[in-house]
Image (cartoon, rainbow, N blue to C red):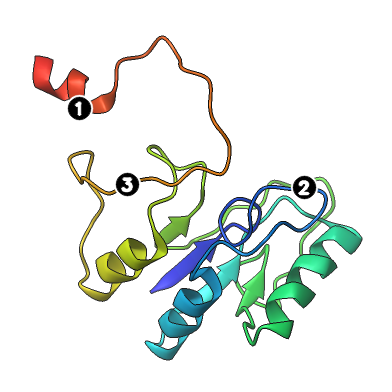
Amino acid sequence: MIIAVDFDGTIVEHQYPKIGREIPFAIDTLLRLQEDHHQLILWTCREGNLLKEAVDYCRQRGLEFYAVNKNFPEEKNEPDTVRKLTAELFIDDRNLGGLPDWGVIYAKIKNNDTFTFNDNYEVKRTKKRKKNIFLKIGEWLDRK
């Protein structure tokens, strides 16, 4: 499976433009997914030196990505073009519901399972988020 992985807030805590502390088990889980023959693409908004810092951070921990901000290493990114990945799965802290624990992520991928709105995983947030006016997904589903 081709898996695109965000950096800030997903592999490390959000401290952009700095690199935050590693989120527990993020690197270990990604290394294990590579051992399971998944292709990992780093998919981040970082560019230039900030991107190099993120790639170097992962490389120093033994994590090499198949590609960075592109579908394959040889792909040429034209300036001012929209980048679209053909990944089968995106791991990102901005997913609906947030970022599940890395153990949950690994188990779902390993078991070829899908995430659903009814999954009862605990999302660990690095920052408190403001409450919004929308109903919680579970409350909304209960009304149907």
The residue carrying mark 3 is 122
Determine which of the numbered discs, if any, sits on residue 138 in the image.
Answer: 1
- Is residue 144 visible in this depiction of the protein? no
| Separation of marks 1 and 2 at Cα, in angstroms | 32 Å
Identity, as a three-letter code, of the amino acid under mark 3: Glu
Which element type, helix, strand or loop, lies under badge 2? loop
Name the mark nearer the viewer: 2 or 3.
Answer: 3
Identity, as a three-letter code, of the amino acid under mark 2: Tyr
Whichever of callouts 1 and 3 sits on the residue coming sooner in the sequence is 3
In-image side of 57 versus 135 (left or right): right
Position of residue 12 measured from the top left corner of the image (x, y, whole percent): 63, 59
Identity, as a three-letter code, of the amino acid under mark 1: Gly
Whichever of callouts 1 and 2 sits on the residue coming sooner in the sequence is 2
Residue 45 lies, with reference to residue 65, above or below; the image says: above
Answer few, some or many: residues within 10 Å of disc 2's Cα (few below 14, many 20 plus, some between 14 and 19): few
Position of residue 52 measured from the top left corner of the image (x, y, whole percent): 83, 69
Determine which of the numbered discs, if any, sits on residue 16 in the image.
Answer: 2
Which element type, helix, strand or loop, lies under badge 3? loop
In-image side of 53 versus 10 (left or right): right
In-image side of 113 versus 25 (left or right): left
Based on the displayed image, in which of its 4 quarters is residue 78 positioned?
A: bottom right
Residue drawn 36% across the image and 14% down it: 134
- Is residue 97 visible in this depiction of the protein? yes
Q: Quadrant of the C terminus?
A: top left
Answer few, some or many: residues within 10 Å of disc 1's Cα (few below 14, many 20 plus, some between 14 and 19): few
Answer few, some or many: residues within 10 Å of disc 3's Cα (few below 14, many 20 plus, some between 14 and 19): few
| Separation of marks 1 and 3 at Cα, in angstroms | 14 Å
